[in-house]
Amino acid sequence: MISNPTTTSPANQPAGPAFIVNDFSITAATKNGSGSQTANLALLRALFKMGIPVSGKNLFPSNIQGRPTWYTIRTSGDGFIARRDESEIVVALNPDTALEDHDKTATGGAFIYEESIKMPLQRDDISYYPIPAKRIAAALEKDPKLKTYSANMVYVGVLMWLLGIEEREMEAALMHHFKGKQKPVDSNMKVVRTSIEWAQANLTKTDLYRVERIDKTKGLIMIDGNTAGALGAIYGGVNFVAWYPITPATSVADGITDYLPRLRIDSETKAPTYAVIQSEDELAALGMVLGAGWAGARSMTSTSGPGISLMAEFSGLGYFAEIPAVIWDVQRMGPATGLPTRVSQGDILKAYWLGHGDTKHVILLPGDPFECFEMGWRAFDLAERLQTPVFVLSDLDIGMNQWMCKPFEYPTEDMDRGKVLTAEQITEMKGFARYKDVDGDGIGWRTLPGTNHPLASYFTRGSGHNERAQLSERSEDWEHNMERLTRKFETARALVPAPQIDIVEGADIGIICFGSTMPAVEETRELLARKGVKTSMLRLRALPMNQQVHDFIGAHKRTFVVEMNTDAQLASLLTLHAPEFATRLVRTNNNSGLPVSAAWLIKRIEGAK
Amino acid sequence: MISNPTTTSPANQPAGPAFIVNDFSITAATKNGSGSQTANLALLRALFKMGIPVSGKNLFPSNIQGRPTWYTIRTSGDGFIARRDESEIVVALNPDTALEDHDKTATGGAFIYEESIKMPLQRDDISYYPIPAKRIAAALEKDPKLKTYSANMVYVGVLMWLLGIEEREMEAALMHHFKGKQKPVDSNMKVVRTSIEWAQANLTKTDLYRVERIDKTKGLIMIDGNTAGALGAIYGGVNFVAWYPITPATSVADGITDYLPRLRIDSETKAPTYAVIQSEDELAALGMVLGAGWAGARSMTSTSGPGISLMAEFSGLGYFAEIPAVIWDVQRMGPATGLPTRVSQGDILKAYWLGHGDTKHVILLPGDPFECFEMGWRAFDLAERLQTPVFVLSDLDIGMNQWMCKPFEYPTEDMDRGKVLTAEQITEMKGFARYKDVDGDGIGWRTLPGTNHPLASYFTRGSGHNERAQLSERSEDWEHNMERLTRKFETARALVPAPQIDIVEGADIGIICFGSTMPAVEETRELLARKGVKTSMLRLRALPMNQQVHDFIGAHKRTFVVEMNTDAQLASLLTLHAPEFATRLVRTNNNSGLPVSAAWLIKRIEGAK
Amino acid sequence: MTQTISSGPSGIAQSMPLSGLTKKANINIIGLEKGDYKGGDSTLCNGCGHDSISAQIITACYELGIQPEALIKFSGIGCSSKSPAYFMSRSFGFNSLHGRMPSVAQGALMANHSLQGLGVSGDGDTGSIGIGQFMHLVRRNLRMVYIIENNGVYGLTKGQFSATSDIGQELKHAGKNELPPIDLCREAIIGGCGFVARSFAGDPKQVVPLIKAALRHRGTAVLDIISPCVTFNNKDDSTKSYAWGREHDERIHDIQFVPNASEIQVDYPAGEAREVELHDGSKIVLHKVDEAMHDPTDKHAAIRLLTEAHDKQEFVTGLLYVDPNRENLAEIHDLGEMPLAHIPNDKLRPSRESLQKLIAGMF
Amino acid sequence: MTQTISSGPSGIAQSMPLSGLTKKANINIIGLEKGDYKGGDSTLCNGCGHDSISAQIITACYELGIQPEALIKFSGIGCSSKSPAYFMSRSFGFNSLHGRMPSVAQGALMANHSLQGLGVSGDGDTGSIGIGQFMHLVRRNLRMVYIIENNGVYGLTKGQFSATSDIGQELKHAGKNELPPIDLCREAIIGGCGFVARSFAGDPKQVVPLIKAALRHRGTAVLDIISPCVTFNNKDDSTKSYAWGREHDERIHDIQFVPNASEIQVDYPAGEAREVELHDGSKIVLHKVDEAMHDPTDKHAAIRLLTEAHDKQEFVTGLLYVDPNRENLAEIHDLGEMPLAHIPNDKLRPSRESLQKLIAGMF
Ligand SMILES: Cc1ncc(C[n+]2csc(CCOP(=O)(O)OP(=O)(O)O)c2C)c(N)n1
Ligand SMILES: Cc1ncc(C[n+]2csc(CCOP(=O)(O)OP(=O)(O)O)c2C)c(N)n1
Ligand code: SF4
Ligand code: SF4
Ligand SMILES: [Mg+2]
Ligand SMILES: [Mg+2]
């Protein structure tokens, strides 16, 4: 391997003030199914390995092959990883969108396009770089199937030359991508090197963008939230999973299915300590999960909007029969089938109240893959402690995009299996009453099916029951039980993860957000701070909300509620949580289907002034 | 027929101040499946025909035979028809509950019991009347099956004697019950007359309750809300119904199925102008209803809580694909299976937001059978005008109990079939765009499948689409479409039935309610008024709410929100509707599963003082 | 106006082409060109079996002279369910919910039973999440053509097992399938379906006549068409792959559709022919191609044939079972000629007097 | 502690009674009296077929010496689904949602496959809303006994048609049923079920041995028991009514359960006997009672028998089909002896080191 092959890259000439370093976005426009993901992820990771903070956002269609796809990589020396609205470096490999990609290229930017694409190139505010991607690929690749694939590695090479991306980090990135298999790495590097050489020989750099090794990613990892959630569940001891495929949640179950055999085979018996079932639909998925949770397993499912709707009846049963279960909802754009490959936070109010009658649910709100892992295991402790379904609301952006984040933290607490009575205890107690609030926290003690004691059993049902789990239609029993469930919800309020709060002295403006909007909010606050505008922030990490949320709103003149949906669902929940401050809440919602940008948020906040 | 056989009734002796006339409750305690419904409904209607305002509340178990059932008839010269908490006249035919029935009898009241029931009778504050119901029935009835049945008519006779209920009105009531069939009327009257004679010969009246003919029911009818809703739908031109059985909604579909053949056979072709399908479940029911509504039928389903949960996904599709449909939800007590034979208003918030993502629905809230009929037909006009599913939220009390109300009013408006383009119009317009807001009200023009024009067709889908109904994943198209749907919801706000409002000069107290709590609210206001406490009232008749609701809350120091659920769902919706007045709302909810009483409400209002 | 477009329960018999005619002219019997039957551009993968089926649907409807506006396209969710957007743009279409096409179709076609229904679903859409609605649709015998584009995999969600996946089939994350496939043809027959056929997307010669015959059927006509997913399920060891299909595709007979009113069956010598009369009077002529002659009116034989093939993990193609005698849903409900959706308002709202009478009985 | 209560996939074989013993003593092999198997007071109608079945379940479990705590009762919603509250109070019970018992049972019995599952459902619960979950349960072959208390009507909602109602059957509001009934036994066989039987609630002599045999089966055992609804479906013209049952109940053979380890079959002379070996080694001995001898290992014969009976609207009772060879769901998932629900926490959470290794790969 050549020690430093890219010294000749124009980007590596002594900079001069004009160069813009580590602070721009690259967008590659291709067709889905053409294999550009390898190219894009390799670019992303190579930059990451150069110590440059990056984020990658994949904008893909809801089909399998041939439709326009855009992958945007943001580099930011400041460490901002939110989506930006424009791109300076644009790679156009898809003729269908080349013109619009061309027009969208930011002033001063670079437009790199497959030479065979014929189009008017009349902008004088950007640099043009035609590249023979197809020709180079064809020359190197015999298998026709693989030709289009290799064409992607050509633009990787050209970008490396253009921006000064280090070859050894690219090789390391590909090594990571191909899980250490040398063969594919070599064949890809061959294309990359050839392309670098071609660029060196045929192109002259006229734009001003380049990257430079720094050390702002030390100690961080790069991972997607669905894989993180899957691992979190596995380290949380999940041992029963029933699920039904749906974008963008499928990779949660895939991650679980892939990692379980490696991590969870009983070392003595060699038997699996788990079972994963792909059910016939979402109703069955949650039905199985409740059955397993009831019988004592750590049980979960993963789905998205349409599945949440189909789980409404079983969610109500889980709430009322008080059965532990974990339900991951990786949110996509609704209503209805909506936009399966676009992000949204449109289920938060719906999941909170899912099910007819007086149901309400505990919800966890991870803000990045690090929290997907943490809430992945914590959800089971909460579900078994509270004996109720616990929802984890992630979204397509966290779930399917690569995020830079802290390395996962090994569970800090032992598993909490909740209130379960053994046969011995029942003997001592001379029986038990399943739904009696013996501890005053609203949570009864349960027994697991098979507990070998004549007084251990009880009859679980979704219809009205008394403390002994016997069918009852008496008003007193019904009211008594509902009061206990309300008390239990108060217990939950105290147990769920507290919000992340940053109160700034003298700030009139508060910002409340949750989930994947966090990076845009952080960037916004930093940029406003630079302008001397102080803001406080509260990131909600769970429902129900606690007193801190109430006080936060009370402590600020106006609080902007940042969320990605049409009806300002979180703003509604906050209004109900803190009615006396209702008028201080400013609906700040966006439902474009794209992750929100700091530019948008700043406009909304300044516009509200 | 004997002109006035009951002159000898002690109740008919010159009154004397001591008698309490037309102002007490009668409760008959029997077992379900024993046929006591005939007896109770006959009593109810006989009193009604005597001009005495009455209401009947059936408290029945969720099984078919042999479990305790209580039927309570309230007589009220004042015209109060809300449920009362205690009963003065108690009939005990069910040994299983006789003791508790005995203890519950109001002081000064009468306890009438089957002689064979052995129990301590030591209260000196009530009158005792043992009756040989079984013996008389056995003597008159050969068929063993019918013996228990006839025993019920014995207490009818005894009550007639005891309270002075007129025999000819009883005969008329039975005639009504048996739809004019003389035979069953005669056999029942035989038991009744024998029992009257027996009572005359063997009992001495020692209590002070009796009835007296007045004319406070003139021009009123007595009917259940489900039958009313069924007829409303038929007069609204329903021509497709898909439904799945569930208590307490089943009698809506039964009513439709029973009346359609009489009212809706095409006089020329003799073909039915309708189709009713019992589907395999609620998902299929709403799927069929949406298919039919889309194709141009006036289409509806009826269900209760669990069915609402199962309809979540299709409701979202109906909202987003913009398809007219009518969904009746006769509410029962939830969560989960809950109490199928107990009343609740626990679906209002759930139905409003049914479906994942940003869905919200138009909801009608009938207050009595009269409005069930009116909203029964109006719902179709709204659904077709607004091109969206319209929910009608009734409840078990309105739906299954007999209510005294105004006679149904024949539809005051012609059918509104909404915006539908013909082939001719499309020729003129040279095509059309299904989801274009041409009129500024957010409602596009639609065509019906089969419209014979090459440009008439469009492709309906639940995924993101542009104005031409083509699949689109572009942010602008999505946002544009969601903005139009929001605009359409504003149109709905103006179109739905306005609330019923009664503002009282100088009243600080407001009361907001909806549905079956109306009678208790009216009684409460009257009784408070007599004490000099002024109250205003707003009865919500639909969602979304309009400005009047907002202003009403603003116009009162405190507004009590009366509803039957655990989580004060309407109070939540009002908080979101009028956040600046949020703190003026007083949660006044009850979830005992029984219709609320004025006594309870007065306590809550005075207690809040 | 829509009264004129079609012809009620008896299908679109009026507009049936005279034998052979359509073959010569490049307009069909109702004066339309094939282009009038085309749809939007497909977004499916190159070589997807579903696209071939779309082409065959177009051919069948064009050759039969079906009025595009008189046909409704239905589907659920999936790659297969996207395909109605890729044929017959002049027809109305309803792309419903995953597994719920049957209920939507029942509602729409009961509201307007004069229209022809053609549904396209997938094996996951019908066999997994949708098996319940499928069974009940078939039981009610709604008049519609129900095409299952069966690739034994979930395409749109990138390759999971469906209820028709083979035992032993392998997929990236899921590993090896160990559950027996559901045979949707057998389910249909047992559910009371009167037209059940199976074919292979790569065999237009067999598929087109089957679709034509299905369009003539009185009730629900189920076509289970093996339609390879080139992207996620085309290993040669899979029964749903092209390679596999070509080898194992075991014919029982091929079919020539003979429209009404045609007397002579030119190229079908008597003796070898066996006729099945459909409800609208048109006939299907079956030709024996090998000794495994199958009588499609014999339910027991059909079930046995399928059970044996199923146990061998093979599939037989052709018309498997026909019973034109069972009433369809519209007939069961005694619907008249006029579709419910066209009944004028004055016939939908009973008279003022009728209401007065009812109220009189409520005092 | 719960490890001790039962015995993993091979059922509760250890605690099996010696032949005849249980008949004499009034305690069974595990020392329990029949009273230990009783449930709460029934709230069903007097004479409801479901109550007879509850009694027969009690008898079967008592005579087999099943540990009540080692059995889970499941049900959906309906009168039938209420009945688990009326037998074996010492067993855990889960009265789930309408039509969704199969999914709940799959979850519970995969979480603890050492327990015996016994589900009670209705024809509406299984055949109408629940047919989808039923088909997929059978396909997965979960080890459980699945009893359908089939009365051809919705009892709890006061008499509507279910998917198993007879053609021509009449009901108050709904009028006449014109749709063919779904035969749940045939569906089960085609779905891959390895134990399918039908009987009649009024025939304990046949029902009890069938339940016993079902409790021994390796996978899903489906018992469709005709169970008359005296209140809403007992017109003598209904196939589900007592009167009808007595007349038409067409036997194919009666069954005597012979437990393991019993050598002599006292009252069953050799020669007339035909044995089917179940997975746990116990045998079912079939006695031919008339010329219509049926071989329950012959799938084709079973399907044909049912198809003929179905077309005649008759039903055959007895053991219809047996195939003890297919792996059950727990076996397919290679579950070990220890139920998932009993695996200690330290085996559920991988080591700190393993996480460090994974993270190292994410830089
Ligand atoms: C309720 C619901 N669950 C899951 C999905 C995700 N989903 C879309 S298509 C599909 C499977 C499609 O498989 P199949 O019917 O075989 O069609 P194919 O793509 O193979 O043609 C699934 C699970 C959905 N759209 N809706
Ligand atoms: C989702 C849902 N829909 C409807 C109902 C109402 N419901 C209760 S039992 C029942 C039918 C029961 O029929 P079946 O399964 O045959 O049991 P049976 O009462 O006849 O024994 C119905 C429709 C319900 N409980 N849940
Ligand atoms: S993924 Fe498979 S089924 Fe879907 S379009 Fe591609 S080839 Fe066809
Ligand atoms: S209604 Fe029928 S099924 Fe229900 S308990 Fe009564 S007899 Fe049994
Ligand atoms: Mg498929
Ligand atoms: Mg039943």
Image: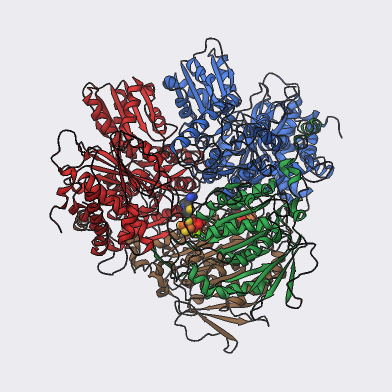
Chain colours: A red, B blue, C green, D brown
Which residue appears farthest toward the top when viewing the image? Answer: B506
Count the marks: 0
The quadrant of the image that shows the C terminus of chain A is top left
Along the viewing direction, whichever of B428 and D33 lies nearer the viewer: B428
Q: State whether residue C321 appears in this view.
A: yes
Residue B90 in view of the camera: no
Task: Tell me which residue sits at (33%, 29%) in the image.
Answer: A601
The residue furthest bottom is D271
Viewer-proximal residue, C357 or D204? C357
Q: Is residue A128 left or right of residue B503?
A: left
Instruction: Return the x and y of residue A44 as percentages of the image width and height.
Output: 26, 48
Residue A342 falls in which quadrant of the image? top left
Note whether B484 is above or below A242 in the view shown: above
Placement of the N terminus of chain A among the 4 image quadrants: bottom left
Q: Residue at x 53, y 51 (%)?
A: C82
Report x, y in % for residue B141: 78, 50
Give left or right: position of A131 versus B33: left
Q: Nearer the viewer, residue A197 or C360?
A: A197
Q: Residue D306: horizontal and vertical position, in percent?
A: 64, 71
Q: Position of residue D288 (x, y in %)?
A: 63, 82
Along the viewing direction, whichever of B131 and B577 lies nearer the viewer: B577
Instruction: Give the answer, above or below, for where A566 lies relative to A244.
Output: above
- Is residue A426 rendered to the left or right of residue B231? left
